[in-house]
Image: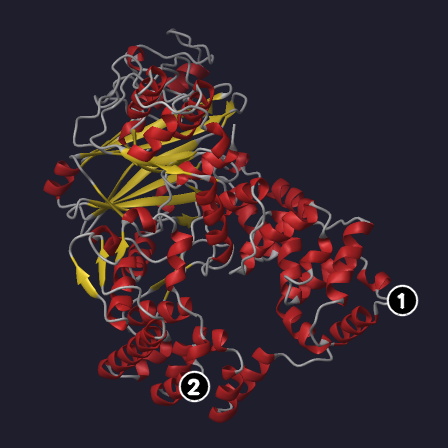
């Protein structure tokens, strides 16, 4: 099966290699017609160019496409919930669980289920269950019964070898960090296609290229890619842990220990986990790997004092790596003089740290020296601009920043403009995500209280005006390719890929965090599927939602199966052998609107020890048409109704918010917010509100294109008959969109 096919599906396309087209038919063949019909049942349609290309491929290739789409949409998985026809409540209560608990202790009479539990009379209506209602073990399974209930199809386009090569180049040159989906696609493309001659845009992207060279035994080619010791550390830590960002070992240890704690004391596994994680984080390298790293550092084209300064922020990690790689031993070899000097300076701390100098002069209110140092590093100056405006005053900080604004990456300029309103607000708490941590709320900067509201508004306006003026100036220097521009209205709801990155993989279609999806009917159906391919075991993942009102919250979860506007399909705590299992929640918009609900947060949690199981899939369905639930099995999944879904790959997530329904606007905002805790009650709604504010402040692709049009004096038109046309299809390649971030 061609791996490029998986990548193309994420881009709403089908990859057809040049050698796969072997015929020249003018009329539609029977096999192609059958393929199109099968795709329609999965919720997909095909464009005319794709249909012509498919019609001239062999049946075997067409079968490969169908199998891949069936795999992506998950129709081969088990989607049977615990309760049959679960939209009709079973009436179970906590009393039923208590009575059953004592019935099994005292061995009273009643039906004995395959799991060994006795269900006493007048408790659970067993005819309504596919498994044990007491322990959540499923016994009966059914197939998907309903297809093609979706009200609109996802149209697939044709992807050729040229399109795949262009997409690879776009990913490599992306000016923003790739999310998990893009990084996974990049690795697939690098394994299948030649490496194009493009400038790698981000340090994280560089790791995949480095991996490629090393797999080819061409480690010497990596030397030209690494510009600092931090690049070396990033690669070593990425290979050891799988994280593209340098997350401290202590942070990883703390997260995994926390994830393995449990509400039930006897099930707490945190102490054992701590020992295992410490053992897993220990470093061990072969002689070949040690020589490779020693050569990278020895041949780096930087002054050793400068290299030491770059190593200083991660000094503790560097000490561990230096020992594990035996760099002191290699530094004694002939030709490794620079490495020897580097280690000597590093251990003696015979170097100055730039950040320390900045803080030294800042605390002494030395304006001239502080800003002279900051101007040496424009990116770091941009990241500290807001705080320096409050510390030294707006005018002097803005004036110093103006002198180097042309050297600041466009993504940082837009970030400043987007978040200025939130930062300079005395009453606003901000949502932040520490590296390797979960989303947190932080209070406003205490220095905001020293300024009046009018002064803060002026600061905000000064930042926004300055940044947008700089960007417009950059656009104006680029000759326009025409006189008119068309921007599809949907682009004003898609944020620019800056800042927040997704840690989940989107196999069906890629969307940016903050993207909004319109709800077509009155029902939204959440789904979660996990455990496929694993042996039967206790693995309790929970699908929940939290409903926020003006003065209260309600939850729909395993402990509250039916609440206002929401119904749960039942709590499954044991997965069957190999086929996985599923849970659902049905959300009634009309009922929630009537009740005055503001928004609904979609969440999943790992109630079992550990994090959310890898390859767990969550998402939601909606349709103008009624979505049925099987009376026989309770299966409620229809791939044609799926609007968005993601696959969890991060092994640090304990709880995850994967979407928020704005009840009044009838829109779903896709977001990704990790939180700690086994149950949905651990979710702080204030964190969700803060993240929504942050996402709402983000610049949309449509707004960015309007800035470009204004700077290049292009007339905006309302029809696609224009010199420059920008559509949703174009924006699906988010890496290509970053070309608008002119540096």
Q: Is residue 86 above or below residue 473?
A: above
**Going by the image, does 644 lie left or right of 617?**
left
Residue 725 is at least partly visible in this image: yes
Dot 2: few (<14), some (14–19), or many (≥20) neighbours within 10 Å? few
Examine the image and state in which quarter residue 142 appears. top left
**Residue at 23% of width from left, 67% of height from top?**
714
**Residue at 53% of width from left, 43% of height from top?**
189
Q: Is residue 208 above or below residue 609?
A: below
Q: From the viewer's side, name the closer residue of 704 and 316.
A: 704
Q: Position of residue 70 (x, y in %)?
A: 40, 25
**Residue at 51% of width from left, 61% of height from top?**
201
**Residue at 73% of width from left, 62% of height from top?**
296
Q: Position of residue 243 (x, y in %)?
A: 57, 50
Q: How is the image coloured?
A: secondary structure
Secondary element at image label 2: loop
Q: Position of residue 394 (x, y in %)?
A: 34, 86
Query: How far apart are labels 2 and 1 at the CA level?
Result: 46 Å
The quarter of the picture where the C terminus appears is: bottom left
Label 2 vs 1, first from the N-terminus: 1
**Going by the image, does 452 lie left or right of 409?**
left
Q: Position of residue 106 (x, y in %)?
A: 44, 13
Q: Is residue 551 above or below residue 123?
A: below
Q: From the viewer's side, name the closer residue of 27 and 471.
A: 27
Q: Residues at badges 2 and 1 in contact (C-beta under 8 Å)? A: no
Secondary element at image label 1: loop
Check residue 403 in the rendering and tell me which mark sits there, or answer none. Answer: 2
Give the residue number, with chain letter if any, for mark 1. Answer: 334
Residue 558 is at least partly visible in this image: no
């Amino acid at each position: 099966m061609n791996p490029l096919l998986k990548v193309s599906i994420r881009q709403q396309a089908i990859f057809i290699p040049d050698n796969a087209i072997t015929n020249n038919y003018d009329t539609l063949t029977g096999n192609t017609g059958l393929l199109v019909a099968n795709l329609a049942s999965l919720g997909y349609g095909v464009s005319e160019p794709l249909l012509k290309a498919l019609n001239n491929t062999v049946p075997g290739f067409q079968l490969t496409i169908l199998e891949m789409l069936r795999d992506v949409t998950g129709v081969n998985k088990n989607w049977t919930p615990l309760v049959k026809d679960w939209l009709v409540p079973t009436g179970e209560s906590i009393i039923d669980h208590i009575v059953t608990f004592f019935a099994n202790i005292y061995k009273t009479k009643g039906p004995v289920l395959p799991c060994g539990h006795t269900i006493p009379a007048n408790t659970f209506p067993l005819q309504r269950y596919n498994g044990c209602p007491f322990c959540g073990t499923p016994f009966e399974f059914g197939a998907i019964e309903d297809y093609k209930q979706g009200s609109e199809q996802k149209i697939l386009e044709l992807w050729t070898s040229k399109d795949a090569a262009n997409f690879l180049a776009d990913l490599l040159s992306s000016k923003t960090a790739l999310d998990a989906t893009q990084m996974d696609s990049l690795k697939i493309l690098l394994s299948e296609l030649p490496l194009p001659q493009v400038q790698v845009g981000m340090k994280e992207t560089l790791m995949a290229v480095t991996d490629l060279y090393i797999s080819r035994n061409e480690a010497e080619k990596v030397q030209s890619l690494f510009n600092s010791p931090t690049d070396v550390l990033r690669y070593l830590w990425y290979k050891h842990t799988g994280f593209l960002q340098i997350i401290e070992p202590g942070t990883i240890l703390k997260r995994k220990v926390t994830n393995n704690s449990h509400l039930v004391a006897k099930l707490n596994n945190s102490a054992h986990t701590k020992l295992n994680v410490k053992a897993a984080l220990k470093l061990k390298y072969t002689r070949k790997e040690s020589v490779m790293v020693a050569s990278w550092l020895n041949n780096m084209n930087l002054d050793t004092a400068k290299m030491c300064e770059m190593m200083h922020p991660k000094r503790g990690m560097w000490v561990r790596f230096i020992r594990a790689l035996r760099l002191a031993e290699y530094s004694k070899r002939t030709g490794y003089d620079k490495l020897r000097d580097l280690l000597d300076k590093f251990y003696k701390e015979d170097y100055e740290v730039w950040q320390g100098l900045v803080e030294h002069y800042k605390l002494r209110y030395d304006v001239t020296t502080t800003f002279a140092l900051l101007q040496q590093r424009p990116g770091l100056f941009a990241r500290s601009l807001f705080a320096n405006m409050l510390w030294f005053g707006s005018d002097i900080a803005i004036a110093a920043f103006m002198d180097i604004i042309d050297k600041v990456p466009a993504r940082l300029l837009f970030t400043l403009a987007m978040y200025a309103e939130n930062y300079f607000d005395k009453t606003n708490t901000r949502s932040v995500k520490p590296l390797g941590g979960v989303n947190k709320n932080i209070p406003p900067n205490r220095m905001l209280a020293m300024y009046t509201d009018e002064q803060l508004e002026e600061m905000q306006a000064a930042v926004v005006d300055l940044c947008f003026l700089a960007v417009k100036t950059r656009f104006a220097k680029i000759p326009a390719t025409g006189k008119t521009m068309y921007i599809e209205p949907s682009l004003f709801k898609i944020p620019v890929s800056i800042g927040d990155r997704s840690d989940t993989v989107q196999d069906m279609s890629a969307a940016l965090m903050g993207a909004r999806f319109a709800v077509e009917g009155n029902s939204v159906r959440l789904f979660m599927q996990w455990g496929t391919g694993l042996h039967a075991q206790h693995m309790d993942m929970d699908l929940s939602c939290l409903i926020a009102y003006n003065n209260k919250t309600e939850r729909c979860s395993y402990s509250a199966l039916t609440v206002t506007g929401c119904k749960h399909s039942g709590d499954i705590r044991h997965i069957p052998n190999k086929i996985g299992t599923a849970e659902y929640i049905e959300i009634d918009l009309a009922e929630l609107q009537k009740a005055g609900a503001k928004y609904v947060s979609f969440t999943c949690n790992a109630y079992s020890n550990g994090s959310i199981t890898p390859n767990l899939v969550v998402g939601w369905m909606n349709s103008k048409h009624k979505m049925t639930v099987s009376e026989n099995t309770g299966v409620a999944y229809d791939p044609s109704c799926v609007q968005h879904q993601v696959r969890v790959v991060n092994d640090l997530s304990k709880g995850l918010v994967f979407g928020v329904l704005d009840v009044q606007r009838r829109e779903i905002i896709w977001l990704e917010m990790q939180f700690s805790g086994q149950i949905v009650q651990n979710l702080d709604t204030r964190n969700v509100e803060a993240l929504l504010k942050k996402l709402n402040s983000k610049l949309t692709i449509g707004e960015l294109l309007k800035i470009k049009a204004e700077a290049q004096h292009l007339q905006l038109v309302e029809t696609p008959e224009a010199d420059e046309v920008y559509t949703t299809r174009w924006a699906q390649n988010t890496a290509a969109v970053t070309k608008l971030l002119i540096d």
